[in-house]
Amino acid sequence: MPTKTIKIVIEGGNAKPAPPLAPTLSQLKLNVGEVVKKINDATSQFKGMSVPVSIEIDTNTKKYNISVGIPTTTALLLKEAGASEPSGDTAHKKIGNIHFEGIIKVAIMKKPSMTSKSLKGAVKSLLGSAHAIGITVDGRDPKELVKEVDEGKFDEVLNKYEEKWNGGLE
């Protein structure tokens, strides 16, 4: 079965039946409106964020499969903090605050693309990212929390989410 794969990056829930997507889909004799609607439905949870999308098309049957990637760590942290862009001056300007459990939520979403073997390691990595873009966690500098994670002060909270982490996203 000959297949064609189209890879695009769109704003979550906001794909449009316009170039470059529309001409490519039309060329493959697919219903552009239907495909765009399915992409928007599949990416709606990532509204306002850039999301990688892959469309695999069987050129004989015209059947297709849409795979949605995961937005960048920065985009997820910014959304969680309700901010639009990184600080640029993290020492003097904080752009938002996230609860510790928000960091865990982002870690679980990013698990497929993270190299961390444990939830604790992923959380520490995301705390570093939050610090780098000017986000506080529970009103504190994320660097302080990394030390506390190492000391075991968040083990109880982390243990609540361990099953989700180990079980993946499904």
Image (tube, rainbow, N blue to C red):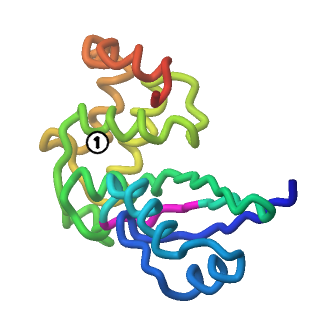
Identify the magenta region. 48-53
Q: Where, by quadrant of the figure, is residue 148 drawn?
A: top left
**Residue 32 or 105: which is nearer the viewer?**
32
Main structural element of the magenta stretch: helix, strand or loop?
A: strand
- Residue 17: x and y in percent read 47, 81
Q: Residue at x 15, y 39 (%)?
A: 138
- Residue 52 part of the magenta-drawn span: yes
Mark 1, secondary structure of its residue: helix
Q: Residue at x 71, y 75 (%)?
A: 28
Q: Which residue is drawn at 70% across and 82% down?
A: 27
| Name of the residue lying farthest toward the left | 139
**Residue 95 or 164: which is nearer the viewer?**
164
Please indicate whether residue 73 sits to the left or right of residue 94 in the image: right
Please indicate whether residue 15 sits to the left or right of residue 66 in the image: left
**Residue 31 or 18: which is nearer the viewer?**
31
Q: Is residue 91 above or below residue 137?
A: below
- Residue 62: x and y in percent read 70, 62
Q: Is residue 106 above or below residue 89?
A: above
The residue carrying pointer 1 sits among few (fewer than 14), some (14 to 19) or many (20 or more) residues within 10 Å by Cα, namely many
Query: To which residue does mark 1 refer?
Result: 142
Please indicate whether residue 13 sits to the left or right of residue 65 in the image: left
- Residue 154: x and y in percent read 27, 19
Q: Where, by quadrant of the figure, is residue 85 drawn?
A: bottom left
- Residue 14 part of the magenta-drawn span: no
| Name of the residue lying farthest toward the right | 1
The disc labelled 1 sits on which kind of residue? Pro
Q: Is residue 59 above or below residue 73?
A: below
